[in-house]
Image (cartoon, coloured by chain):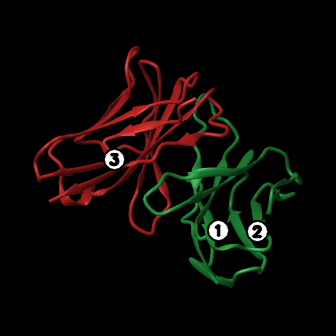
Chain colours: A green, B red
């Protein structure tokens, strides 16, 4: 089945720094989604991407849908302490009938040092 | 506009008991997805339901697990004869259409089997 690869498992940055996270797949996805999960909470949708090459921003967050449709990246600029959390990428493959479930990466845990 | 509501937030069961997890989707959403998350893991798809129909249960264990989404009321994920390995966070997501685009998650139910 489809797998999404996110690495490294953890990232440590200084407050104010920018950080970039990548998500890759061996197969094509039609949609890429980025979620953030705080401890004890459910994932919250940050950005959704629908077209290859698309670049979308949401405040200090910017994400791009790779041209090959096999990768996506998320940038966080000028990090702040509340950016701490686990960042998941999720992809939706080309539809096969009514089956279009999301596949999730394992997530990257981001720590921000004050 | 309430989000996806899951209850209970925390559930403790002894081995051999039954666990029932409930999920009420967002208003206007008729598609529900259940995911399981183990510590330091991503979310693993379990089952996709529409009202009164199971569309995709390819991620569900063949035994002891079942799910339903009746015409009236919440979606239920039922685990019979729980074992320690069932301990995990179970998340429900809902979307407006079958494309699963922009699925929104609940806060999860943390099941602990003792």
Sequence-first disc among 2 and 1: 2
Density class for disc 2 (Cα within 10 Å; few <14, some 14-19, many ≥20) is many
Residue under label 1: A83
> What is the chain identity of the residue bearing mark 2?
A
Identify the disc placed on residue B9: 3
How far separated are the C-alphas under marks 2 and 1? Answer: 9 Å
Residue A36, located in which quarter of the rendered image?
bottom right
Task: Tell me the residue at 62%/27% (across/down).
Answer: B96
Q: Quadrant of the C terminus of chain B?
A: bottom left
Left or right: B37 in relation to A75: left
Q: Chain of mark 3?
A: B
Say if labels 2 and 1 share a chain: yes
Residue farthest to the top?
Answer: B71
Marks 2 and 1 close (CB-CB < 8 Å): yes
Q: Position of residue A107 (x, y in %)?
A: 57, 66
**Percent position of residue B80, x then y:** 18, 41
Q: Which residue is mark 2?
A: A76
């Amino acid at each position: 089945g489809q797998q999404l690869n996110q690495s490294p498992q953890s990232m440590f940055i200084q407050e104010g720094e920018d950080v970039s996270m990548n998500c890759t797949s061996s197969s094509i996805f039609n949609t890429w989604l980025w979620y953030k999960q705080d401890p004890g909470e459910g994932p919250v949708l940050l950005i959704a991407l629908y077209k290859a090459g698309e670049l979308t921003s949401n405040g200090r967050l910017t994400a791009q849908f790779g041209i090959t449709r096999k990768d996506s990246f998320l940038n966080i600029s000028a990090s702040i302490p509340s950016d701490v959390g686990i960042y998941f990428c999720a992809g939706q493959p080309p539809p096969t009938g009514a089956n279009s479930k999301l596949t999730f990466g394992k997530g990257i845990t981001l720590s921000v040092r004050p | 506009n309430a989000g996806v509501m899951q209850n209970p937030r925390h559930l403790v069961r002894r081995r051999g008991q039954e666990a029932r997890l409930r999920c009420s989707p967002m208003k206007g959403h008729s598609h529900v997805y259940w995911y399981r998350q183990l510590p330091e893991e991503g979310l693993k798809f379990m089952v996709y339901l529409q009202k009164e129909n199971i569309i995709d249960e390819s991620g569900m264990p063949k035994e002891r697990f079942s799910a339903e989404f009746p015409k009236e009321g919440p979606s239920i994920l039922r685990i019979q004869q729980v074992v320690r390995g069932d301990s995990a966070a179970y998340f429900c997501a809902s979307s407006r259409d079958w494309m699963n685009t922009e699925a929104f998650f609940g806060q999860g139910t943390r099941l602990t089997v003792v």
